[in-house]
Image (tube, rainbow, N blue to C red):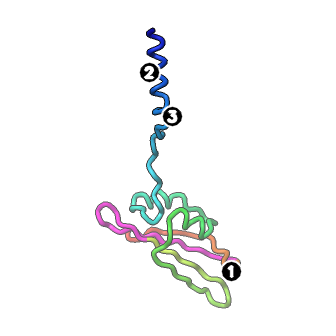
Amino acid sequence: MKRLLTLLFLAALFPSLACAAPAATEPSRSPENLNLGQAERQAADLKQGMSTEDVQTLLGKPRRTALKSSGSGAQGTLQWTYNWTGSSSTPGSLRVDFVSKTPNGWYVNSWEWANY
């Protein structure tokens, strides 16, 4: 009789266990919603040679862009600027410089933190 009650209890409990959702992990933040600390950690993954798409996936869309020509038909430098505010309202600004050997073939050449 005790075994039968245990089986009935487990049978009644099983459907609720099967429907229970697994514990959710913290959703990843979109790059556009990063704070300064998170941006610093993300920027640590910047590498020379990364494409513009790779950088955008890592850090999101830049706040400002600039194209500096080096003259004589050369491609010049593409600059992306990102701005974040830290916990003490201190701004952090990251400039990523891209160079290109072909049109639309931009890749990371260097980056620098400013106002830091």
Left or right: 88 with respect to 36? Answer: left
Q: Quadrant of residue 36?
A: bottom left
Expressed as whole percent of the image width and height from the top left, the position of residue 90 reads 32, 67
Q: Which residues are magenta?
A: 83-101
The amino acid sitting under disc 1 is: Pro
10 Å neighbourhood of mark 2: few (<14), some, or many (≥20)? few
Of badges 2 and 1, nearer the viewer stands 2
Residue drawn at point x = 45 percent, y = 75 percent: 63
Mark 2 / mark 3, whichever is N-terminal:
2
Mark carried by residue 103: 1
Extreme-left residue of the structure: 88
x then y, percent, for residue 83: 41, 71
Residue 76 picture quarter: bottom right
Q: Is residue 43 left or right of residue 36?
A: right
Instruction: Tell me how far mark 3 sits from mark 1, CA to CA.
Output: 55 Å
Pointer 3 residue: 18
